[in-house]
Amino acid sequence: MIGRSGANNAGNTAVTAVNYNTRQSSVMQYWTPNISGFQGKIAYSPDSGQTATQNKTKLSLSGTYENDMFYGVLAYENRPDQTTASVDDHATRLLGVYKFGDGLIGMAYERLSVGTAIATSESQSNWELAGKYKLGDSNLGAFYVKNGNLGARVNTGADMYTLRYGYNFSKRTELYGAYTRLSNDASANYSTLTATAIGTVGAASTNGSTQTGLGIGMIHSF
């Protein structure tokens, strides 16, 4: 995926605190064979806490295509009873990455829909842009995410960008640094500080806040 290191607002809605980037405790999956770069995937997560009135299962579908220069995926997820009983939350995501020489550029669009009342859903659109380029042992990266308003709720979006620099000491070891800036609209409180659910409501954020972060790290592959 593009942008995951610095653009974690994607996959999240404001106000209602719905996060589509969560890892499930139990999942059944099937992946089709890869046929000339095309592959389909399906995953189902049962609800271990099912009740007589709620059954919070999750169904995910995706189709991908990849070759030496292009990667594309269309994915869909459905979550009944997740936010509001008898209403399905669902998300659709389209992503494409074009690779050229020592660089790549990518774009993603997603449409999220959440239940906010009985028989009522509100939708939100998010955009994500990413780029990376290698210069010898160094590499430069940039990520940008635009969160739209949730339904008719004005000023519930946000803008977030990250600039990243990495240096490869070897094929297995990289030292990197990154700067991130997040600007919330007046009625949104996405956060850069929540490691487990970045972009959800609460957690070291207030409505309309602007947050910045600077970090360094090292990656070593064994």
Image (cartoon, rainbow, N blue to C red):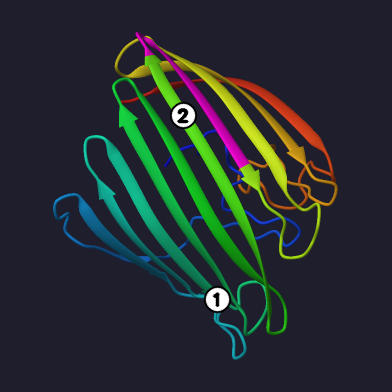
Residue visible at 62% across and 85% down? 86
Residue 21 visible in image: no
Residue visible at 66% across and 56% down? 13
Residue that carries the numbered disc 1 in the rendered image: 56
User: Which disc is residue 189 wearing?
Assistant: none
Image position, residue 98 (x, y; %): 34, 36
The number of numbered discs placed on residues in the rendered structure image is: 2
Image position, residue 66 (x, y; %): 25, 45
Residue 13 visible in image: yes
Residue that carries the numbered disc 2 in the rendered image: 131
Task: Look at label 1 and name its amino acid.
Answer: Lys
**Magenta residue span:** 135-145
Q: Which residue ends up furthest to the left in the rendered image?
A: 36
* Residue 205 sits in quarter: top right
Q: Secondary structure at mark 1?
A: loop
Q: Secondary structure at mark 2?
A: strand
Crowd tier of the residue under label 1, counting other residues whose Cα lies within 10 Å: few below 14, some 14–19, many 20 or above: many
* Residue 14 sits in quarter: bottom right
Task: Look at label 2 and name its amino acid.
Answer: Gly
